[in-house]
């Protein structure tokens, strides 16, 4: 079962090939708040509200009418974050990215990856090792499917990262509730990161896109998808990507624990889009992206493909004015 949202705030509930608008609902955030208040799941809340007109979801996606599948009414209360070195093979990808870096830099990455292999999937009731973690921004950087992922003028690169994101809403008592999972493009500046690993934080302060649909329920243990880049309508690079716990060095529960252990991230009403990492990057294969390129990420288990063109901002950074 899947949730999506239009730019006008209509919420669409899809089961199989049938997609219908959820009645009396203004945005997925409203639907999720209602489910939490009623003490039941998303599916039960949809049933309580009822379904209206059928829609052609592929046509809506193709027409650019689908927004991110959820947004917070106040973008300042929506957080985009993620983890790295969480997938089998991600350490070798990082090594390829840092081919010109010092041995010391590579050792730090490999150490963290090995820590995850050894203690990223603890037994039930135990806490495993914490993963690499990064911040991307507030809801202000959440880009709708089909809309451009824009690199700032000072960026050295703009590259895709095909990932699965968990979608979470914090209840009135500070309890995190997981709505489901979505495809995401955790767009980053890999050239900046390659200069020095301590620039990772800078490289991640970029927009990101997720959706077009939220898959409710559990994350499949073995997620298989395809990431590709098109230029002038032709594929210039494509590669399979893997996710799900069978292909990860950390359990989902461990990644969630180490994000929500911070009280800062358990503020009532806040919305979190947390990306779980990847081992597949076109940058590691020597691809240089260019404005106009189209990123495409798809996986059969996640419905409509996520597509975003690349754009480049030409504006100068603002200067500070003393008062």
Image: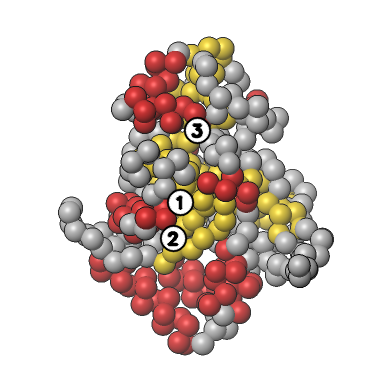
The answer to whether residue 164 shows anywhere in this view is no
Classed neighbour count for the residue bearing mark 1: other residues with Cα under 10 Å, few (<14), some (14–19), many (≥20): many
**N-terminal of the two: label 2 or label 3?**
3
Q: Secondary structure at mark 2?
A: strand
Q: Which mark is residue 83?
A: 2
Residue at 62% over, 51% down: 141
* Observer-nearest of 17 and 193: 193
Instruction: Name the side, left or right, on which 212 lies relative to 236.
Output: left
Is mark 1 in CB contact (under 8 Å) with mark 2? yes
Residue 270 spot, x, y in % from top left: 47, 44
Residue 57 spot, x, y in % from top left: 59, 25
In this view, the residue farthest toward the front is 323
In this picture, is 285 found above or below 56? Answer: below
Q: Which residue is mark 1?
A: 274
For discs 2 and 3, the disc positioned in front in the rendered view: 3
**N-terminal of the two: label 3 or label 1?**
3
* Observer-nearest of 274 and 139: 139
Q: Which residue is mark 3?
A: 29
Residue at 65% over, 31% down: 7
Where, by quadrant of the figure, is residue 9 drawn?
top right
The quarter of the image holding the N terminus is top left
Instruction: Name the side, left or right, on which 319 lies relative to 132.
Output: right
Residue 247 spot, x, y in % from top left: 36, 55
Is mark 2 in CB contact (under 8 Å) with mark 3? no
Residue at 33% over, 41% down: 173
For discs 3 and 1, the disc positioned in front in the rendered view: 3
The quarter of the image holding the C terminus is bottom right
How many circles with numbers are drawn on the protein?
Answer: 3
- How far apart are the alpha carbons under marks 1 and 2? 8 Å
- How far apart are the alpha carbons under marks 2 and 3? 24 Å
């Amino acid at each position: 079962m899947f949730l999506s949202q239009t730019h006008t705030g209509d919420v669409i509930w899809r089961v199989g090939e049938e997609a219908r608008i959820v009645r009396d609902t203004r945005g997925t955030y409203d639907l999720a708040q209602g489910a939490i208040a009623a003490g039941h799941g998303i599916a039960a809340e949809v049933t309580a509200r009822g379904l209206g007109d059928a829609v052609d979801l592929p046509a809506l996606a193709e027409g650019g009418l689908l927004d991110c599948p959820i947004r917070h009414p106040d973008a300042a209360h929506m957080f985009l974050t993620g983890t790295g070195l969480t997938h089998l093979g991600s350490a070798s990808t990082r090594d390829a990215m840092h081919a010109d870096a010092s041995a010391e830099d590579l050792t730090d990455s490999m150490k963290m990856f090995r820590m995850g292999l050894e203690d990223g999937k603890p037994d039930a009731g135990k806490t495993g090792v914490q993963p690499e973690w990064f911040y991307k921004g507030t809801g202000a950087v959440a880009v709708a499917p089909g809309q451009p992922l824009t690199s700032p003028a000072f960026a050295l690169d703009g590259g895709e990262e095909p990932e699965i994101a968990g979608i979470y809403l914090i209840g009135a008592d500070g309890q995190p509730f997981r709505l489901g999972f979505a495809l995401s493009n955790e767009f980053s500046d890999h050239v900046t990161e390659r200069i020095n690993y301590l620039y990772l934080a800078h490289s991640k302060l970029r927009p990101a896109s997720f959706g077009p649909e939220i898959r409710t329920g559990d994350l499949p243990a073995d997620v298989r998808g395809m990431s590709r880049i098109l230029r002038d309508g032709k594929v210039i690079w494509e590669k399979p990507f893997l996710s799900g716990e069978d292909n990860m060095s950390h359990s989902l529960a461990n990644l969630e624990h180490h994000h929500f252990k911070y009280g800062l991230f358990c503020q009532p009403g806040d919305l979190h889009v947390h990306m779980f990492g990847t081992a597949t990057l076109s940058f590691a294969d020597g691809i240089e992206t260019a404005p106009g390129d189209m990123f495409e990420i798809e996986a059969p288990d996640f419905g409509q493909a996520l597509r975003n063109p690349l754009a480049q901002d030409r504006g100068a950074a603002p200067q500070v004015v003393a008062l």
